[in-house]
Amino acid sequence: MTVITRFAPSPTGFLHIGGARTALFNWCYSKKMGGKFLLRIEDTDKERSTQAAIDAIFRDLKWLGIDWDGDAIYQSSRAARHAEVAQDLVKKGKAYFCYCSQEELEAMRAEAQAKGEQPRYNRMWRDRDPATAPAGVKPVIRIKAPLDGETVIDDAVQGRVTVPNSQLDDFILLRSDGSPTYMHAVVVDDADMGITHVVRGDDHLNNAFRQKVIFDAMGVPCPTFAHIPLIHGADGAKLSKRHGAQSVGEFKDMGYLPEAVCNYLLRLGWSHGDDELFTKEQAAQWFELGDINAGPSRLDMKKLDHVNTHYLRLAEDERLAAEILARHPELKIDDEHRIRLAAGMHDLKARAATLIQLAAEAKFYLVDEVAYDEKASAALHDHDAHNAMHHIYDALARLGADFKEAAIDTAVRKIAADHYEGKLAKVMMPLRASLTGSTSSPPILKAAEILGQAETMKRIKAALHWMHDHGHHHH
Ligand code: GLU
């Protein structure tokens, strides 16, 4: 048997990270089993489906590197087939036309309510002769659900789940306008696509029982279900807007790399021993449905940062440079900036948890004039800063062609020893502030080497001017 899985998003909003995780699990399982992974866009709800949401699904799956076999299937394009199957089930005696009026249904509901029971269709047309149908009424098609016994699902994650058939009513397959219900469309599509394993959120577990009834009626083997617990927020509540980011697009904007998001999402609710850092290709070799956790998982942004830090270090410098430049559209970038950025990347990428941080920390290589943040201003206000900067200026000016990290280090240490009782910070802090505009940066002496002597001297001089303008003078 060839394993065929699918991801079946409804394009009613952004691609949720829970959806992305579902897609990843399906992708991995199909790869593991040497099978196929299909994409079905469940766009039958014309009111709520949008082209923008469809575009976002394609864009975000591509960004994550999740590819599917063949063309995406649009559920809406299969409406005729859904109707055909419903009609066929009527012919086979597995379903029937129901001519109930709105009033009759309402009366049933009221009656059930009065008895304190669940409102349920009373199956009044199940065995009636259609010849007695009222004239001019367009019928719906209802399934003949089993009347006794129970429906059992051996879920690969949830275990055996059972519902007494007395709880399943003769639900509708085809509406009176000929359109399929969601329940029916899903089953017909899964059957026609040859889906062998349905891996999806456990919010669909309840649907699975009714879907099994349709599979049985169609005489098609029911796929194996694997209902995965939803992702919860750090506080344990179901993930919602108030937890912040929920969509793949938001995680992208927040500066996470796709391989980090994939790794993190796979690890969220699935595990392979103690492995924490792995590619989705690696996960695909390990993937077993039985290793999906049955309990809910919690989104942990610290952990995601940790995973992203790992992948930032592994990422190609050119790729990161492009990401950084894309995040600074306000800057005019020339070759000099590019050369500095390339030279500085090794130290930059070792420090950042996200591309946003990386872009912020890289900025000093890409500007011609440094703006001082609050802490940098404070560092330049230190009462020794002005003198220290003069000493640095003089010492660095003498370095000439030997403007390398080691030589700069020697010079800085000598100033600290000669004037500040060896306190290196007295020299390093204002130097860092003047070169980067910040008090936190990659190793600053290496950064000075990368900026080059001329630029370094220029920035120190600018800081001296700034201090002068801000009321600092030689003591
Ligand atoms: N379209 C459904 C959703 O987006 C998924 C249905 C399924 O996987 O069976 O929640």
Image: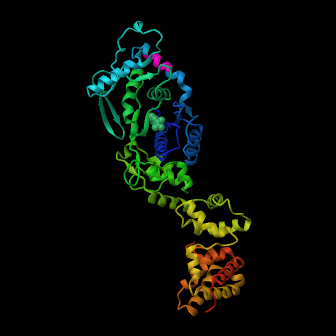
Looking at the image, which is closer to me, 320 or 255? Answer: 255
Looking at the image, which is closer to me, 464 or 307? Answer: 464
Which x, y percent locates residue 151? 32, 28
Do we see residue 4 in this rendering? no
Q: Is residue 121 left or right of residue 251?
A: left
Q: Quadrant of residue 361?
A: bottom right
Do we see residue 62 in this rendering? yes
x 46%, y 39%: residue: 33
The image shows a total of numbered marks equal to: 0
Is residue 40 found inside the magenta-colored segment of the image? no
Q: Is residue 164 left or right of residue 242?
A: left
Q: Residue furthest left?
A: 115
Q: Residue furthest top?
A: 131
Looking at the image, which is closer to me, 108 or 301? Answer: 108
Q: Is residue 127 above or below residue 428?
A: above
Q: Quadrant of residue 406?
A: bottom right
Q: Is residue 206 above or below residue 368?
A: above
Q: Is residue 368 left or right of residue 304?
A: right
Question: Which part of the image, by quadrant, shows the C terminus?
Answer: bottom right
Which x, y percent locates residue 325? 66, 60
Q: Is residue 232 above or below residue 168?
A: below
Question: Which part of the image, by quadrant, shows the N terminus?
Answer: top left
Is residue 85 found inside the magenta-colored segment of the image? yes
Q: Is residue 379 above or below residue 419?
A: above
Which x, y percent locates residue 214? 40, 24
Looking at the image, which is closer to me, 419 or 161? Answer: 419
Stretch of the chain drawn in magenta:
83-89
Main SS class of the magenta portion in the image: helix
Q: Quadrant of residue 61?
A: top right
Q: How was this image coloured?
A: rainbow
Which x, y percent locates residue 197? 43, 35
